[in-house]
Image (cartoon, rainbow, N blue to C red):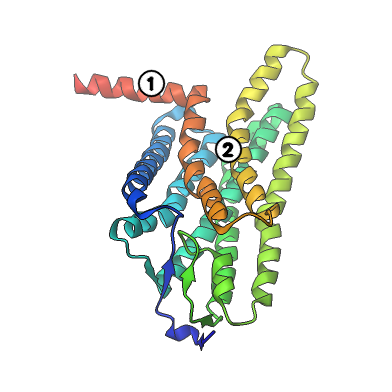
Amino acid sequence: MKKENQSSVSEFLLLGLPIQPEQQGIFFTLFLAVYLTTVLGNLLIILLIRLDARLHTPMYFFLSHLALTDVSFSSVTVPKMLINMHTLDQSIPYAGCITQMFFFLFFTGLDDFLLTSMAYDRYVAICHPLHYSTVMGQGLCTFLVSVSWILSCASALCHTLLLTQLSFCADHSIPHFFCDLDALLKLSCSDTSLNELAIFTVGVTCIVLPLVSILISYGRIGATILKVPSTKGICKALSTCSSHLSVVSLYYGTIIGLYFFPSSSTSRDKSTVASVMYTVVTPLLNPFIYSLRNRDMKGALERLLHRAKLLSQ
């Protein structure tokens, strides 16, 4: 293949989802509806938490940041995908592709760390309820969120800077609907061993360690729940964790199935469709999981609607 210097690369081509041209209109409408629902649903969560004093607790403090992350995470990939589907123009500028990859990695890492912080919050609430207000103070919550942002930015910046040092071959077609790091590395004509080492190191830090921390937290929670003598107490403890556990299972389940257990027979199209699960579907489901299965959120929504009804009279 003809080797080109990275400075001569002006754009990449996003091949998009494996759908037929005559189906573009249907999928455009579907993904537009999904994206708008995702944005409005997560913004509603943020609004409820900000307006309702009953939700000014550590758990909902983390949830508000998770909702903001989900809006941003979805906005990194879906709007560009919709534009490409609508205009049938698959190109994305080199700078735009690198920027999209940075923010995709940034918000992916931030999601991981926030889910870990929420798991620790549930661990303290159930295993050490008498010390909960002391341990999970405003200072610790702010510290955990700040560290999440810093580590996520550092990991994304590391991958981005290493990628900009690579040269790319004549074929600039990315078999994906967004600028995926792995897909970009496969287009490079340079030695990517340093990039692969960074992927392994950062992957352990941003994916494996958070997942292990979550599993340890819920292992301790499970052991504590089994010691509760009453069925009512067990149900109450489980209800406080069910929403978060559902999100963790959906998010990590898709990532593990896609990246840790890839099938040799799995085609590019199947991998692309699987990526839609955690980039598009998971941010969409989070508002429904936390609102429909959370009594506090439903109560806050009812109070907000009642207040709006009174103001309209």
Give the spatial CA distance, label 2 vs label 1: 23 Å
Question: For the residue carrying disc 2, how many other residues have a C-alpha within 10 Å: few (<14), some (14-19), or many (20+)?
Answer: some
Please tell me which residue lies in front, 125 or 99. 99
Could you tell whether 80 is left or right of 132 in the image? left
Q: Secondary structure at mark 1?
A: helix
Q: Quadrant of residue 187?
A: bottom right
How many numbered dots are placed on residues in this image? Answer: 2
Q: Quadrant of the N terminus?
A: bottom right
Q: Quadrant of residue 13?
A: bottom left
**Residue type at tag 1:** Glu
What x and y, as percent, mark residue 283? 48, 43
Q: Quadrant of the C terminus?
A: top left
Question: For the residue carrying disc 1, how many other residues have a C-alpha within 10 Å: few (<14), some (14-19), or many (20+)?
Answer: few
Q: Which residue is mark 2?
A: 247
* CB under 8 Å between discs 2 and 1: no
Query: What residue do we see at 74% from left, 47% from top?
Result: 212
Q: Which residue is mark 1?
A: 302
Please tell me which residue lies in front, 66 or 135. 66
Name above or below for residue 95 compared with residue 89.
Answer: below
Question: Quick check: can you spot residue 210?
Answer: yes
Query: What residue do we see at 78% from left, 14% from top?
Result: 229
What x and y, as percent, mark residue 43? 39, 40
